[in-house]
Amino acid sequence: MRDTVCGGRFTRGLRRLALIAAFAALGGFSLPAAAEESDGTQDEVFALGTLFRSVVEERAGSPSELMEETVGRTQIQLFEQRTVDEAIMRLPGVRYVRPRGGRFESGVVVRGFSAFGNRDAAVPLFVDGIPASVPYDYSMDMGRFTTGGLSAISVSKGYSSVLYGPNALGGVVNIVSQRPTKPLYGNATFGIGTGDTIEANGIFGTLQDRWYAQVGLSYLKREFIHAADTFTGTDSTGQERDTDRKNYGTRDKKMEFKVGFLPNQTDEYVVSYLRQTGRKGARRDSGSCSSTTNPECWALGYIESWWEWPYWDRETLSYVSKTHLGGIYLKPRVYYDKYDNGLYGWGRSYATRDDSLSRYDDYAWGGSLEIGTAKSENNELKGIFSYKFNQHKAYDLEGHDGGRIDGSDEKLEEQVFYFALEDTYRISEQWEIQGGLLYSRRQTTYAGEGLNIADLIIDYPTTDFGLTPPDIDSWDPQGVVFYKPTKNHAFHYSIAKKTRFPSIRNQFSNYGAGDTYNAGGAIGRIPLVTLPNPGLKPEKALHHEVGWDGKFFSRRLAVTLDLFYSTNRDLIDRSTVDITTYPGYAVQQVVNVAGDTRRSGMDLGVEYIADDRLLIGGSFSYLHSENKDVPAWRPTHPAYNGSLYASIRLNRWASLVPAMDYFGRSRYSSTGANRWAYNQGAALVDLKLSITPPMHRNVSINFGAENLFNTDYRGYNDAYPSPGRYYFANVRYAL
């Protein structure tokens, strides 16, 4: 009976959706019969939102573009993937990490390099070529980025264009929006799912001779999550209970506008506005849950996170254009990016919630100018000059709208400047080379507020933490050579040096402020203090890759194979707690870890289009990591992961889409006794039925289930239960 616990709301919603679907199938929607759903082709990709795509039209499809892998809107909709991290999870070398932990963040790991997290975000996120990262810690919760309104997501692994700038230590993820392709352009989706999930999004626009305009809206809400098995957790009253409901919900809204001017066949000038508003936290049944006076209203199941985010918002205003002047082009980009989020801390008991709100009020602004050749047949030279200013400002409030708490203010600023050159030269029809050079520099200003070290300095007045951080700069060269003996086969070898600067959080973390640490024995509990480390060095990586891209059987079978080897040094991580250096205090610090971490492995991708009725595909990735200087260290990632999927057309109007994602076992910890404990691997199966009414080819009706067999794949000693079976249904429409 657990799978029907989604309750009457899902059943009633499914009935309503079935009525809508039946109405559409019987002709209730007056839609043009010739119109068909867009297939996510290049035309609707907002080309100015890309950095790596060739601007020379006749060279589109150059071998150098093999260094980026792209997931288009067609594939996103095929697998019903609702967030960006889910959308790229089936690319070889990419592993999806479900939402979990105190921050309830999700994201991906690219060849062992994390794309999220507050300490190790080594694969930065871009939106239409604009860096999207909280200025304080460079991290982003990728689960807050929904796929509604996207045309494509490109992923670079190891080697990435120098035009992206610094911090692309392990790769890059760039989200690209849509662009109207005809006078009446649009698509929309409405769906429901387990956990009181509601999904609604749409893009509508027009393309005219000299201009275009577009508006997009997206809404994704889930009230709670069903666990794969009953789980013994603690409710808000402090009582243990067996439950299959994880009382944690999310809500994400997105609104975007785009206006473009097209004076001629080659030039384009675009102003865009994007606003995201998010919320995540334990579900409430009444407004009185904002205080401790009525804790019972939280007793709806196991509450996974100790933190609640009443708002997680991002707002971006940008301008980008492309102008051709004879044999060169100019591509300026300017933007203003604002981040607001609030956090309620819960301590260790929901019945004694702390009503103070920790608030981030960060913003960034910047711009770049890209200049490149536009008409050379064999050589494409690009250069970029970029500047970005980040400001982090944080403070605590009494409740959501109360006054500021004295001594809680924190303000830091940084400036990042870089310039890069990238030259792609076609030697012959078979050989092509590309070289890149990036110089980047960062300056940080600390305002002298907000650190939790005041008491320690009073007790140890001779301590000097040197709160003026030095400027940091880096030179990063890279190169790749391509060999294409036939039109169906291409080989490449690349080498790239990459640098990630320490974030403001890395250097001036206030982690653990106000907490105590149990030192045991006669010492007992003592204050926990995080020491600043302004002299933290940047983290560096060197990537090697050999790859092959092949086509067989009239190009119906596509195979990609990459072998890679990376070294990673000056790893940035938090130290263990020290109770001896400053007696009476437990101290920790973000430091550069000694030794080189080495990663090697293989990524394999296969896709076969048998005919217009059957598509089969899959991926397999193997990753081995070690630290030569610390032999006892063990990696915590699975050695292998991958996927299998198919799209089977049953008849003219129905298709079946099965998919399976699998991952091997992994160690629970890198060091200590727990490095011998293992998280077990698992295979998760999804299944979807898609119906396209014959009289209305621009309507699709989709039903399905994720984690079909309700597999419980939580790790060893895991405090966070894994999500169980998820049912969904939706209707999709395209003009």
Image: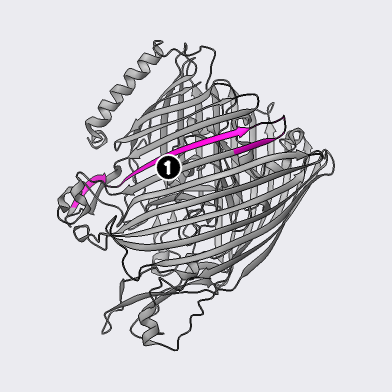
Residue positioned 60% across, 55% down in the render: 168
Element assignment for label 1:
strand
Q: Is residue 253 magenta?
A: yes
Amino acid at circle 1: Ala
- What quarter of the picture does the N terminus occupy? top left
- Toward which corner of the image does residue 685 lie, by quadrant? top left
From this viewpoint, which residue is outermost toward the bottom? Answer: 462
Front position in the image: 265 or 642 = 265
Q: Position of residue 13 (x, y in %)?
A: 29, 27
Please tell me whether residue 211 is drawn above or below residue 711 in the rendered image: above
Q: Position of residue 269 (x, y in %)?
A: 64, 37
Please tell me whether residue 407 is drawn above or below residue 240 in the rendered image: below
Q: How many numbered marks are there?
A: 1
Front position in the image: 299 or 662 = 299
Q: Position of residue 680 (x, y in %)?
A: 40, 52
For label 1, the crowd category at 10 Å Cα-Cα, with few meaning under 14, some 14 to 19 and many 20 or more, is some
Q: Position of residue 539 (x, y in %)?
A: 58, 65
Q: Which residue is mark 1?
A: 683
Residue 266 placement, left or right of 427: left
Front position in the image: 705 or 104 = 104
Please tell me whether residue 20 is drawn above or below residue 619 in the rendered image: above
Say whether residue 131 is visible.
no
- Which region shows up in magenta? 241-270
Residue 47 placement, left or right of 588: right
Residue positioned 44% across, 51% down in the render: 141
- Toward which corner of the image does residue 63 lie, by quadrant? top right
Front position in the image: 521 or 609 = 521
Residue 362 placement, left or right of 383: left
Please tell me whether residue 562 is drawn above or below residue 213 in the rendered image: below
Q: Is residue 526 magenta?
A: no
> What secondary structure characterizes most of the magenta part?
strand
